[in-house]
Image: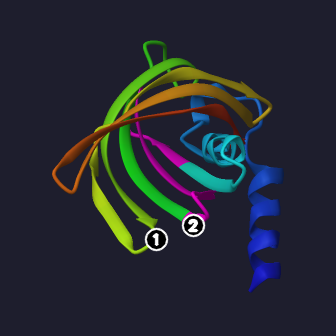
Amino acid sequence: MKKLFVFLFFLIFCFSPLSSKENKFISISFDSGYLIDGLMKYGWGAGGIIEIRLLENFSFSVDAGYIEYKEDDSKLTTLNVLGTIRWYPYTGMEGFFTGIGFGTFYTILKNERVQGYMLPVEMGLKFIFFGFSIEPGLTFLPKYGNSTFFFGMKYGLNLGYTF
């Protein structure tokens, strides 16, 4: 199964149009924001983004991430899943973008569990070079969970492939 996945990814990579901006309709990226957040707290994190172009200037992205680190001699684990509508003022999925969306989070610390909702507001730049995308971005994460409001922020450099 793993070999089939690698083979299919290789075919998509080799035969997709590498330089045509007009045909770009999907982007798959590694989200380094979760890794940076985890490393800053002496832990780790991982995340990914899938973005699909809906209209000429609009796309829908799904972002999922996991962070784990120690806080006060106990492990803190957070899982985020969010969907965002992105607007590109220029045509295609390239250049400056801004977006707003809806998501959920789930955090475990000791035996206490916090789950809730968030309304992400994001902005960034997406550069595409021969199909490879580099996307520095900043996301503000107002959260509501267990009758309490939280505020989070995620920043990073997303690296991926657009085809």
Work out which quarter of the rendered image holds the N terminus and state it.
bottom right
Tell me the quadrant of the picture where the C terminus can be found. top right
The type of residue carrying mark 2 is: Ser
> How many angstroms separate mark 2 from mark 1 (CA)?
6 Å
Q: Which mark is residue 96?
A: none
Element at badge 2? Answer: strand
Residue drawn at the location 38% of the way across and 28% of the way down: 99
Dividing the picture into quadrants, the one containing residue 61 is: top left
Q: Is residue 69 magenta?
A: yes
Residue located 42% across and 56% down the image:
81
Q: Where is residue 117 in the image (x, y as percent from the top left)?
A: 26, 51
> Type of residue at label 1?
Lys
Mark sitting earlier along the chain (2/1): 2
Q: Nearer the viewer, residue 140 or 52?
A: 140
Query: 10 Å neighbourhood of mark 2: few (<14), some, or many (≥20)?
Result: few
Q: Name the residue under label 2.
A: 74
Q: Where is residue 155 in the image (x, y as percent from the top left)?
A: 58, 30
Mark 1 sits on what residue? Answer: 110
Q: For the residues labelled 2 and 1, say whether their Cβ atoms are less than 8 Å apart.
A: yes
**Residue range of the region highlighted in magenta in the rendering:** 50-75
Indicate the position of residue 128 as horizontal and vertical percent values.
71, 27
In this rendering, position of residue 152 left or right of residue 15: left
| Farthest residue, direction front | 72
Judge whether residue 73 can be spotted in this image. yes
